[in-house]
């Protein structure tokens, strides 16, 4: 399975595998078509009904399964009764092919799934997550059967041997063969570093491995053919530059196609170990770039110049070429139907072009997807065509009538940002796409849905008294909301590009914003009226920050200058030029005596606004995250250096590095209200909470490697709120005990559950609350209304 980037399909590159054959030991076992409209404009929130519900990890798994992500892989079970979808996340879904009902969800990976493969009998599924693990699953129930840690690899190739229960797994310097029935391991060792692709011959007697050898100059790339019966390598195919990233056997097993990083395809005669044909154009980023005809006489290829080409292999002749009419449209995948009559060709405008072998031309174009086709799969009997798209949906068409018979969509949206009200237990949650919801975490009720944005939220901030909310999105829509009524107070107009930062004055009377348009602006915090423009900046303004007394505003600018303005007049009061690169962040100490700034010159510096003195860098390396956060009492300053949290002690001048390093640069850095803990994480890095006294990572809600794009501490320190990429919004105790969970459907329906009372509030149609258990996924029906009493 290929990795993808939105807007274009690409094949994930494979790094060095960390799985050794000897390490393949058995660990203990784990114990209606979701079509939903896109975000609808609706301020109204449905009235909920209360329902008892035993809370468990299965409830969370069921709720999170409502989100699919943009679909990068789709596949049918070998018997065609089920199909699977794999999105841009950590779970895979298996559906009933006739009813399109969700049967089970494969949940357990902590990183994005990069490979998915059905066993030949359809009873098991193998998945691989980037830099994490290989897992085996019971395809009927979703129960995890095995987990094998892989280490820091990018995407380990796997391939089931036809007609058997043997899984081939690439390992350093070889290929392991795992028999999943008795957990025995055999394999092939070689003098190479990694295998980038694996493919079994149709009869299962030969295994092809695209290998790379990094210990020689230049790096060696070849294709090795191993015989299971002879337990050795029987052939080596050489001559294709750059390394092979896709392998496909011809149905007869006498030829092998290889797609290479050098953007060519070669057809190899296995017996003679020679190249029969070189196809000069191959898109190495295509997810489904090669597809043989069932009789082995033709091959369809995605070319590197936006086209798809169909070749007669024996004649060594191109017989058809499809180039989409739009200049910027590319072909993304090809799939030959099992009967051989049709080739499906997907493009990045969401269309499927059907080429007829009999007529030698495209005879139909199927439309419905709004973004790129990322994956294609014909049902084993050829009667249906399944496509997955970056529009976060899968669709099925009948081959005979070209009728679309199913649309599978996400019911929920990922969480981008979370923020507690400073004065209550109300939380604002920004969902991907721009919808904002307000959740009373005390009662569990969703109180308001705020629609009005056109894109993902960049900045979200409550006023100090909690009565107003300011928000900006990536489509230059900037709004001021009245929290009680869910009405828009004003649209903040004046910036000519996106607002990146919002800061309220301590009294809530004014609002400062910084933008890509190289200006900062001051607004009336109650009416949204424009008050002043802070000019003089030479580039993007990443951060604006009101001083604690509300008299000054500091700005961090890409021109490398930190500026301080009079908040009343907009006049520039001071600036410092000590940084040698762009300034990405500024933060006032709580007493207003110091201003910290972080720069891409790898330093954090302190500026004394009273004296104008610039102090030296307090740490040697601040990383690209540009995170800065003062402790509530101002005694410490936290930043991130080389993906570690570094805490500077204002009194002693010492710095302390926290225990663990993040896997990616943190997207947030938040202190607990008592200053005892600091939390960090991002949409790519699991959240970690550190105790400041010793710098140790605390074991809490982050134990399972949960990834949260944002986190916020409640002002009383008794709760933490998080949101994740599946749309789950959760509150926790500081010790990591779950308290409440909320999920909001795209249609405005919602479910909120309380772990402490084992109760759910439901304002849905009976399909949003579901449990992923040992018997698959089952919807929890709505409680019955009491029968009217007879008079």
Image (tube, rainbow, N blue to C red):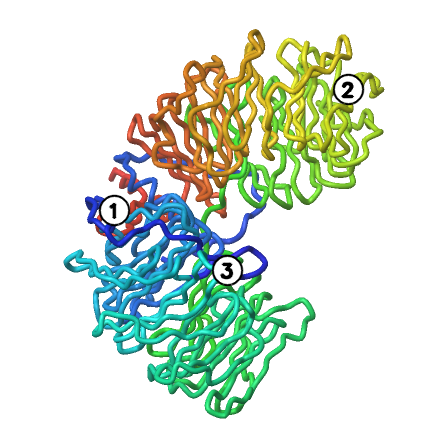
Q: Earlier in the sequence, mark 2 or mark 3?
A: 3
Q: Earlier in the sequence, mark 1 or mark 3?
A: 3
Q: Earlier in the sequence, mark 1 or mark 2?
A: 2
Q: Is residue 387 at least partly visible in the picture?
A: no
Q: Which residue of the protein is positioned furthest toward the front in this rendering?
A: 217
Q: Are marks 1 and 3 in contact (CB under 8 Å)?
A: no
Q: Is residue 713 at least partly visible in the picture?
A: yes
Task: Give SS at disc 2.
Answer: strand
Q: Which residue is mark 3?
A: 217
Q: Position of residue 610 (x, y in %)?
A: 75, 8
Residue at x-position 47% and y-position 12% = 674
Task: Give SS at disc 1.
Answer: strand
Q: Position of residue 3 (x, y in %)?
A: 47, 57
Q: Are marks 1 and 2 in contact (CB under 8 Å)?
A: no
| Residue 491 left/right relative to 237 | right
Residue at x-position 53% and y-position 40% = 431
Q: Position of residue 68 (x, y in %)?
A: 43, 52
Residue 231, quarter of the rendered image: bottom left
Can you tell which mark lies on residue 564? 2
Q: Which residue is mark 1?
A: 773
Depth check, front residue: 700 or 583 = 583
Q: Residues within 10 Å of mark 1 (few under 14, many from 20)?
A: many
């Amino acid at each position: 399975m290929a990795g993808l980037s939105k807007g274009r399909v690409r094949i994930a590159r494979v790094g060095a595998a960390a799985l050794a054959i000897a390490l393949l030991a058995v660990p203990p076992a784990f114990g209606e078509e979701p079509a939903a409209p896109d975000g609808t404009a609706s301020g109204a929130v449905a009235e909920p009904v209360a329902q008892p519900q035993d809370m468990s990890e299965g409830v969370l798994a069921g709720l999170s399964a409502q989100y699919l992500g943009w679909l990068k892989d789709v596949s049918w079970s070998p018997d065609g009764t089920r199909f699977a979808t794999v999105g841009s996340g950590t779970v895979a879904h298996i559906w009933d092919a006739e009813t399109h009902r969700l049967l089970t969800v494969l949940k357990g990976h902590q990183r994005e799934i990069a490979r998915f493969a059905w066993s030949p009998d359809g009873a098991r599924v193998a998945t691989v997550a980037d830099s994490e693990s290989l897992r085996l699953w019971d395809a009927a129930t979703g129960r995890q059967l095995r987990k094998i840690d892989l280490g820091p690899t990018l995407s380990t190739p796997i391939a089931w041997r036809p007609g058997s229960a043997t899984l081939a797994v690439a390992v350093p310097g070889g290929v392991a063969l795992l028999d999943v029935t008795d957990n025995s391991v055999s394999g092939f060792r070689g003098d190479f570093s990694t295998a980038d692709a694996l493919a079994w011959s149709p009869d299962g007697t030969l295994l092809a491995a695209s290998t790379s050898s990094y210990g020689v100059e230049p790096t060696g790339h070849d294709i090795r053919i191993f015989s299971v019966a002879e337990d050795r390598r029987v052939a080596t195919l050489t001559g294709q530059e750059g390394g092979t990233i896709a392998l496909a056997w011809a149905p007869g097993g006498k030829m092998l196609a290889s797609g290479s990083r050098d953007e060519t395809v070669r057809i190899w005669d296995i017996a003679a170990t020679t190249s029969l044909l070189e196809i000069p154009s191959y898109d190495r980023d295509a997810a489904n770039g090669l597809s043989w005809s069932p009789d082995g006489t033709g091959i369809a290829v995605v070319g590197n110049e936006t086209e798809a080409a169909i070749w007669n292999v024996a004649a060594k002749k191109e017989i058809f070429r499809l180039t989409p009419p739009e200049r910027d449209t590319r072909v993304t995948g090809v799939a030959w139907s099992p009967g051989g009559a049709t080739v499906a060709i997907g493009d990045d405008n969401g269309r499927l072009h059907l080429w007829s072998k009999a007529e030698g031309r495209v005879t139909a174009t199927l439309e419905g997807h709004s973004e790129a086709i990322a994956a294609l799969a014909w049902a084993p009997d050829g009667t249906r065509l399944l496509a997955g798209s970056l529009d976060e949906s899968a669709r099925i068409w009948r081959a005979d009538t070209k009728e679309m018979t199913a649309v599978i969509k996400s019911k929920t949206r990922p969480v981008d940002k979370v923020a507690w009200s400073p004065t209550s237990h109300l939380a604002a949650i920004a969902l991907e796409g721009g919808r904002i919801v307000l959740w009373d975490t005390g009662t569990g009720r969703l109180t308001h849905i705020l629609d009005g944005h056109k894109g993902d939220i960049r900045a979200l901030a409550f006023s100090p008294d909690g009565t107003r909310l300011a928000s900006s999105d990536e489509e230059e829509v900037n709004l001021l909301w009245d929290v009680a009524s869910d009405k828009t107070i004003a649209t903040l107009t004046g910036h000519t590009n996106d607002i990146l930062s919002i800061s309220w004055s301590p009294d809530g009377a004014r609002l400062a914003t910084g933008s890509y348009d190289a200006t900062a602006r001051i607004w009336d915090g109650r009416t949204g009226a424009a008050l002043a423009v802070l000019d003089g900046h030479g580039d993007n303004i990443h951060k604006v920050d009101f001083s604690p007394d509300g008299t000054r505003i500091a700005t961090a600018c890409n021109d490398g200058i930190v500026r301080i303005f009079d908040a009343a007049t907009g006049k520039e009061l001071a600036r410092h030029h000590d940084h040698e690169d762009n300034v990405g962040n500024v933060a006032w100490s709580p007493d207003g005596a110091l201003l910290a700034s972080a720069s891409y010159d790898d330093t954090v510096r302190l500026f004394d606004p009273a004296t104008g003195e610039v102090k030296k860098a307090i740490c040697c390396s601040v990383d690209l995250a540009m995170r800065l956060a003062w402790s509530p009492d101002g005694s410490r300053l936290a930043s991130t250096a080389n993906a570690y949290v570094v805490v500077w002690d204002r009194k002693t001048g010492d710095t302390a590095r926290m225990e663990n390093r993040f896997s990616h640069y943190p997207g947030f850095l938040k202190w607990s209200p008592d200053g005892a803990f600091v939390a960090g994480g991002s949409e790519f890095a699991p959240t970690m909470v550190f105790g400041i006294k010793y710098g140790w990572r605390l074991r809490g809600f982050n134990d399972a490697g949960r990834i949260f794009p944002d986190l916020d501490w409640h002002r009383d320190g008794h709760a933490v709120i998080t949101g994740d990429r599946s749309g789950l919004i959760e509150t926790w105790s500081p010790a990591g005990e779950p308290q409440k969970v909320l999920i909001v459907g795209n249609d405005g329906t919602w479910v909120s559950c309380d772990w402490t009372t084992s109760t759910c509030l439901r304002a849905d149609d009976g399909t949003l609350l579901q449990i992923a258990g040992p018997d698959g996924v089952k919807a929890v029906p709505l409680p019955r209304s009491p029968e009217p009493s007879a008079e």
